[in-house]
Image (cartoon, rainbow, N blue to C red):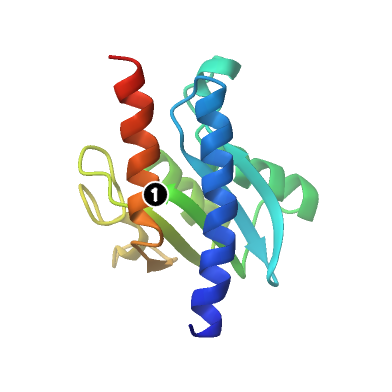
């Protein structure tokens, strides 16, 4: 396994753990981990229901935490690992933060803003682009979501 793939595997496993923890709290099981210089800076799972905040997606929570830790709202050189393709709000926040790279698990056919519904991270009119790697442990991410929603039916 190439070195980049090893790093992606390690950090996506951490994002999946955050998703599992979110699901255990009754939140939709999506997790995110923000990495800088091969170190996790911030990690989060969805907190929309617990925080009563529609913007408390895992990605947003992780970006906010990382900005406070780093001391800058710009996060150049970082990679955001997310279990599911980010929505428009989260993709927009990544652009504002100048995240360098996104690695995500499964596509989101209903709300994905990376390639499923929109292509925000490489739009030619924007002044920042985000490198994207998709499909990292997609099966595990989908399984978490399917199990979560099946248990609620």
Can see residue 98?
A: no
Dividing the picture into quadrants, the one containing residue 7 is bottom right
Mark 1 highlights which residue? Answer: 140
The residue at 35%/63% (across/down) is 134
- The residue closer to the viewer here, 116 or 71, is 116
Q: Is residue 77 found left or right of 145 in the rendered image?
A: right
The residue at 58%/41% (across/down) is 18
Tally of marks? 1
Q: Position of residue 43 (x, y in %)?
A: 65, 46
The vertical placement of 128 against 27, above or below, is below
The vertical placement of 103 against 110, above or below, is below
Density class for disc 1 (Cα within 10 Å; few <14, some 14-19, many ≥20) is: some
Q: Is residue 17 found left or right of 84 in the rendered image?
A: right
- The residue closer to the viewer here, 133 or 65, is 133
Q: Position of residue 23 (x, y in %)?
A: 50, 28
Q: Position of residue 68 (x, y in %)?
A: 76, 45
The vertical placement of 51 against 86, above or below, is above
The residue at 57%/44% (across/down) is 17
Can see residue 135?
A: yes
Q: Position of residue 73 (x, y in %)?
A: 67, 51
Q: Which quadrant would the C terminus be assigned to in this image?
A: top left
Query: Residue reaching furthest bottom?
Result: 2
For label 1, the SS is: helix
Dividing the picture into quadrants, the one containing residue 135 is bottom left
């Amino acid at each position: 396994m190439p070195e980049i793939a090893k790093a992606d595997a390690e950090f996506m496993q951490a994002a999946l753990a955050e998703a599992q923890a979110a699901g255990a709290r009754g939140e939709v099981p999506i997790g995110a981990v923000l990495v800088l210089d091969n170190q996790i800076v911030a990690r989060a799972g969805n907190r929309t229901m617990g925080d009563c905040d529609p913007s408390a997606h895992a990605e947003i929570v992780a970006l906010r935490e990382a900005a406070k830790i780093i001391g800058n709202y710009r996060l150049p050189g970082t990679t955001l690992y997310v279990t599911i393709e980010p929505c428009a709000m989260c993709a927009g926040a990544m652009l504002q933060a100048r995240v360098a790279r996104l690695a995500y698990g499964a596509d989101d056919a209903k709300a994905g803003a990376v390639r499923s519904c929109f292509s925000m991270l490489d739009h030619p009119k924007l002044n920042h682009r985000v490198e994207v790697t998709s499909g990292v442990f997609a099966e595990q991410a989908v399984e978490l979501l399917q199990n979560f929603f099946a248990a609620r039916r």
